[in-house]
Image (cartoon, grey):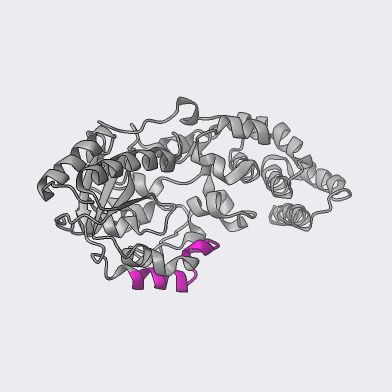
Amino acid sequence: MRTSISESALRQLIEREASRAGFAAIAVTRPDAIPLAPARLAQFVGEGLHGSMAWMAETLERRSEPSVLWPEVRSIVVLAMNYGPDSDPRALQAMSDRAAISVYARNRDYHDVMKGRLKEIAGKIVSRAGGDVKVFVDTAPVMEKPLAEAAGLGWQGKHTNLVSREFGSWLFLGTIFTTAELAPDEAEIDRCGSCRACLDACPTEAFPAPYRIDARRCISYLTIENKGPIPLEFRPKIGNRIYGCDDCLAACPWNKFAQAASEQKLAARDDLREPRLAELLSLDDATFRIFFSGSPVKRIGRDRFVRNVLIASGNSADATLIAPCRTLLSDTSPLVRGAAVWALSRLLPDATFSALAEQMLKVETDNDVIAEWQAGLTQVEQSRTQS
């Protein structure tokens, strides 16, 4: 049952509660405000640029139009939470013994943080205005970035992420769908101009064109969504990035405004700012779950995570990591064993690696791991030929 509250009073209530809950900005749009999004999403999926993220194809219709997801929606409140880092996260890439975890994953899982707070605000809307509400973070089939652009919170930059004049490229987004009628805000315009800093910063050239991304080449996809071995061509380019990649975000010139906008910001866990590769290599399933309790990193599981750490170890040129990498040759996970082979092919002298391969190929039974050993031996042979 709808209570008597004016539209302006409801808007003030939402803004007040959002600020109290730690959101840096809010804006309102209509469910029909993103008419171009369905075709763009269909093209992205149709060209296979989503890689193995099958859920994108499965939820295509609901994701492309908010009114298909929930026909009763009349207004969409888009809320943004600032997670901007205190310094450029790319500086960590020069520390070869350390691991680089994407800025967004250095704190509690933002899905959990935001959803609880969105529900609180949604409850206040219903108690004052009646009607019905639904809250969504980005695990639901909602196109938050186009909606945020339509609401005026920012624009989708050439790296396909939202860019804000106040917060740069560092915003988490959530939405509240409501049956209440709220006046929409004015859409933001594209302010990227001729800048292509984000495109040029990508280590794997994952942008086939401005405003388009090939997820299959993106380090965030390769280290998080990809469940199998990381393709050989991308491993050296990953460097020490073990969970996600911030390069395109960090390169955005609009971030200079994000440093000043420090109020109501999610801060990183100290132990996830510069973790040591050697310590992460030692994580078994139980210790992994404890260490990353409440973190989004936990969602990929220990085996995929250690796979990523081994790739970073292979790129480190750090001989102190040879021993823990050798230990992982006997890991129960073929995914881990295969990554350990690659790491050792980069860390060991050619003769030592060849001798180790001869020994391990006598006992290895997994075809993918055997292929890793053979690829390493081929590389050794090529190295000898060239010398």
Residue 197 percent location from the top left of the image: 31, 52
Q: Is residue 382 above or below residue 61?
A: above
Q: Is residue 292 above or below residue 66?
A: above
Query: 227 and 250: which one is in front?
Result: 227
Q: Residue furthest right?
A: 362
Q: Quadrant of residue 127?
A: top left
Q: Main secondary structure of the magenta part?
A: helix
Q: From the viewer's perspective, tell me whether residue 93 is left or right of residue 331.
A: left
Residue 308 percent location from the top left of the image: 59, 44
Residue 168 visible in rendering? no
Query: 123 and 242: which one is in front?
Result: 123
The part of the chain drawn in magenta is: 38-56
Residue 58 visible in rendering? yes
Q: Quadrant of residue 375?
A: bottom right
Q: Residue furthest front?
A: 1
Residue drawn at the location 82% of the way across and 43% of the way down: 356
Indicate yes or no whether the magenta region holds residue 228. Answer: no
